[in-house]
Image (cartoon, grey):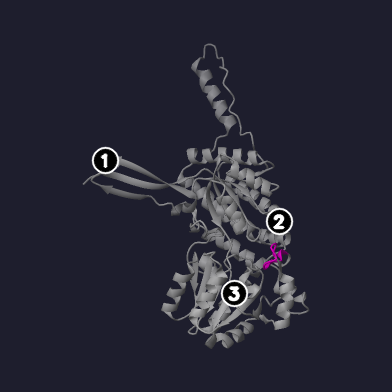
Amino acid sequence: MDISSQEIEAIVRKVIAGINPATNVTPDIPAIKSPKYTGDNGVFERVEEAVEAAWKAQRDWVTNYKVEDRHRIVEAIRRCGRDHVEEWSHLIVEETQMGRYEDKVEKHLAVINKTPGPECLTTEAISGDAGLMIEEYAPFGVIGSITPTTNPTETMIHNTISMISGGNSIVFNVHPRAKRVCAECLQALHKAIVDAGGPANLITMLREPTMDTVDMLTSNPKVRLMTGTGGMGMVNALLRSGKKCIGAGAGNPPVIVDETADVELAARKIYEGASFDNNILCFAEKEVFVVSPNYEGFIHNIQKQGAYLLNNSQVEALVKICLEPNKNQSGYEVNKKWVGKNAALILAQIGVQVEDSCRLAVCEVPADHPFVLVEQMMPVLPIVRCSTFEEAMEKAVIAEQGNRHTSSIFSKDVDHMTRFARLIETTIYVKNSCTKAGVGIGGEGHCTMTIAGPTGEGITNAKSFCRRRRCMLAEGGLRII
């Protein structure tokens, strides 16, 4: 049964009054103060207020709630997410102008249903002649979480389930281009937590997120851990902060289709993955290296799936639309105006009219083409012909640029699969399916939208956001043998 601060105070006063019935004088009892910072269902104007409220909530969370309470409240979050999934998917497309509604629904359902809760926080024990040792997963405390515009509420839901399952509270600094939908999502999740009996302000966010608020969040001494999902510039900035950091950085995932591959399967799965949510996912297929014996068959089959094959002049025209010179004038960077836009809309800019059912444009280019080396995050997929499997591996490693994020291969040769895995060293490695299967979207295993490649936590879950603590009972205590 939940009892408010006011009810507790009234009970205490009655008890003390009853101790001295002769005078029936109620002593002067200091009032039990409500939290100073209440916010707007978790949404705050100032960093200090958001952190302070989250800090108080986290102390309450670990002091007064059991693990079974965490299970109950996580289930309330899942129910809330399912109730709002269509609404939030529409709002993301409307606010960010990126991606596809139906794919965002699928992403939401994956993180809602397949992000592990407290059940993954297993205790490890060793019993021996020298005593009993247990190691458990303990919270860091307040976590600062920076979320992207590409998966705004999906990341918020995943991080909320994972982080509070580990006993933490969270202050979100969301991407400014998704602040409205994130505020609606956080307020709904906040209400679900409170309605299920959890503490207010276990999750908070800044109403007006900026880079300044990121710096203030990072420097606040009550924030014990920082997490960031986005580009490597952001991740590197967090790493320089001096705090423990979990960073999910950039990708540019290459795919190899070798000479033994089932080209029909490869074309179908690559089309599905590279066009999913207009390719804004960091783990989506970004370039394909096809070994020569299967090259023509692959081109034919991916067109059968619905891809539009660009000719050389159209490729040149599209480079001028989708890319722009970088600041050093030494190469290209993506034109953010076209990130996550539908293929039909992008193609219309160069005079190509296709139905919206065409979800992907493909082009035949050399391995040093900017479409191969620049992570576009739009449904334009470069395809490179390679003479041998060894050449495909070499060029794929160059294209991946050491991000060690995601890669995949279509092959029936186990030796090829093994060699490429060892060479590419990516956090996610998928064989004979689209790369989204590697994060549990159409594949086995739990789901995440925080893929911590740079800092090594990988496919994050509640364990990732916890400290390992050891407790030792010496002299053979509790042993029965």
The mark found on residue 199 in the picture is: none
Q: Could you say where residue 4 lies in the image, as x and y percent from the top left?
A: 57, 34
For discs 1 and 3, the disc positioned in front in the rendered view? 3
Relative to 265, residue 116 above or below? above
| Neighbour tally class for label 2: few under 14, some 14-19, many 20 plus, Cα within 10 Å | some
For the residues marked 2 and 1, what is the alpha-carbon distance in whole angstroms? 57 Å
User: Image quadrant of residue 375?
Assistant: bottom right
Whether the magenta-drawn stretch holds residue 396 is answered as no
Q: Could you say where residue 154 lies in the image, as x and y percent from the top left?
A: 60, 58
Instruction: From the image, give the main secondary structure of the stretch colored magenta.
Output: loop
For discs 2 and 1, the disc positioned in front in the rendered view? 2
Dot 1 corresponds to which residue?
477
Q: Could you say where residue 43 lies in the image, as x and y percent from the top left?
A: 66, 45
- The mark that comes first in sequence, 2 or 1, is 2
The mark found on residue 287 in the picture is: 3
Q: Nearer the viewer, residue 50 or 186?
A: 50
- Look at label 1 and name its amino acid: Gly
In the picture, measured across the screen, residue 361 lies left or right of residue 220, that is right
Q: Nearer the viewer, residue 52 or 107?
A: 52
For the residue labelled by badge 1, is the local secondary structure a helix, a strand or a loop? loop
Q: Which residues are magenta?
A: 326-336
Residue at left 32%, top 45%?
133
Task: Report how many numbered discs are placed on residues in the image.
Answer: 3
Dot 2 corresponds to which residue?
177
